[in-house]
Amino acid sequence: MKALGKLRLVLAVLGIIYILIPLIAVVPASFTSANYPSFPPKGFSLQWYTKILERQEFVEAFFNSLQFACLAAFFAVLFGTLGALAIAKYDIPGKHYVTSILTAPLSVPQLVLGIALLIYFTPMMLAGTSTGFLIAHTIICIPYVIRLVLTGLSGFDYNLEKAAAILGANPFIVFWKVTLPLIRPAMISGGLFAFLTSFDNVTVSLFMISPNMRTLPIEIFSTMQDAYNPIVASVSSVVIFISVILIVVLEKIHGVGKVFGGTQH
Amino acid sequence: MEPLRNYADQEVSEQVKVTGEPQRKTKVRKRRSWIAGLLLLIPILLFVFGFFIVPMLYILYLSFISTDNLNGADAVYSLQNYITLFTDSYYLSSMWLTVKISLYSVLVSLILGYPIALTMAKSSPKIRGYITLLIASPLLVSIVVRNFGWYLLLLPNGTINQFLMNIGLIKKPLNLLFSELGVVIGLSNAYLPFMVLAIATSLYNIDPSLEKAGAILGASPMRSFLTITLPLSLPGIVSGCVLVFSLSMSAYVTPSLMGGANVPMMPVVIYDQINTLLKWTFGSALSYVLLGITLLSVFFFTRAFEKSKFREVFR
């Protein structure tokens, strides 16, 4: 009994280390003073962080990523919240199918989605433009927002809306003062999740970028393909840092595990 | 999805208010309410329809057009793309390679994931929460960053090779990166959290008194695991395997970074056809074949389990 329990525990710890080890390796490697990244690092220096600022393409890509992720999250939350409200609240015929359609972009491989959008956008002159990029990223974010807001609405007490209406509030006041504050946590976690989905995305972005519009993961991806450059370690550490901050916020509001618990195909 | 609005309750209040024609009034109100709902739905439906459904159908249509010229001068409707795919040995071996590597990564994540899920199920809710946070957080960090971490560990002069050479186990560095092994490591690492969460969910639902009853009747811990816990967690195992398999089949970034040209999995081949060779119609056909193979494998895998002796587990 004891021996089996111990074996299980050891295997579990090994498994968790296996999940985390690539991330654990990156951050120390970025502080190396050598000309190549290694884990454990050789010496200590911040040279690879100051070098990011000298590489204009990384700085530009970072701000592009930030901008697109914010916009994609905004549109996904806007459309997604309205859609989820409609599905949860109104007796729309075939609402089960509507939910499936709206979450379908999640079950199609991102590679295929990227290809479809590239081929579709080219005659529309949207390929390689920021509009096209934004549309593609909004599409991949929408399913998560729909799921999270629907989950948030599942415990919603519609009597509160009714009570407000009886007390004389018009529909807009009801929405603003009653509905919105109650679904705000679900909207915020949906937005954060959408932000990270867009900010981290490589596969769809690969088909949407143009030479003068690139994002940070794309820069990391192409640098890794060309050369083994230590600057990737410091840029990656910046990405990890941003992700960790958002993960902490997401965990406080919603619980990171729950987000993925609902992400069943 | 259950309708969340309590209509019965509403109708009563309507009837109390307007005693004249309660029936008709309610009907009108009901219809008006779903029309309002439709108005809220229209923006997102149009968006998803216009930028997801139509493009997907468009490349399905394109996949039935075959052309050798890039300008499409000789374009004709035919099944030529699909015929080439299933007769050319290059594409066939790429399909087989994709399925093989995906199966390996399912196997690795199952073996590594089960003990984690079991430990989560046996822990207190607090510990469970911490483990969930630890294993789910990497999913929110870009895949390129996670792959770069593996570069540091797996390169010929990377951590693992250095370590093995220092303790004298190997003389020459092993080819861990840019090989099938590297892709399996990358994919299983990336999707292991999904496996753990799927299995853990089904383990949480097992009634703990079953194991107690087994122990009282004299079953050893090993036996009670094999006859009670493992069979009851099978639905979780199946859904975890299905998820990891389909994600591995269609992953592009990990195979191209960790395998490169040495491991031409289907997504890598498709990417080359579309972005390098600009063969859009052929690439579209390849995309749909990839989708088809994934869906078919998942279908048969799930069916096989539903028909096996564990059928009762699946309701």
Image: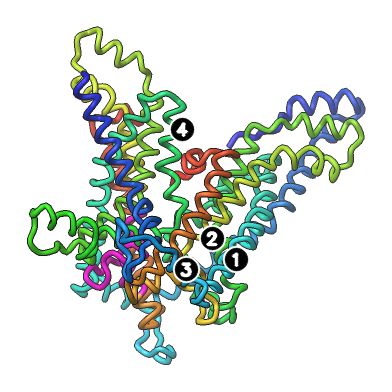
* Three-letter amino acid code of the residue under disc 3: Gly
> For mark 4, does the 10 Å Cα neighbourhood hold few (<14), some (14 to 19), or many (20 or more) residues?
some
Image mark 3: chain: A
Asked whether the viewer can see residue B79, the reply is: no
Q: Quadrant of the C terminus of chain B?
A: top left
In the image, is A82 to the left or to the right of A11?
A: right
Residue that carries the numbered disc 4 in the rendered image: B129
Image mark 4: chain: B
Q: Which residues are magenta?
A: B247-271
Contact, mark 2 vs mark 1 (Cβ under 8 Å): yes
Of marks 1 and 3, the one in the foreground: 1
Residue that carries the numbered disc 2 in the rendered image: A198
Answer whether residue A51 is magenta in the image.
no
Colour pattern of the rendering:
rainbow
N-terminal of the pair, mark 2 or mark 3, is 3
Q: Are marks 3 and 4 on the same chain?
A: no
Residue that carries the numbered disc 3 in the rendered image: A114
Q: Which mark is residue A68?
A: 1
Per the picture, the main secondary structure of the magenta-coloured stretch is helix
Give the image location of residue B111, x and y in percent. 24, 40
Of marks 4 and 2, the one in the foreground: 4
Asked whether the viewer can see residue B74, the reply is: yes
In the image, is B309 to the left or to the right of A193?
A: left
Identify the element where label 4 is drawn: helix
* Three-letter amino acid code of the residue under disc 1: Phe
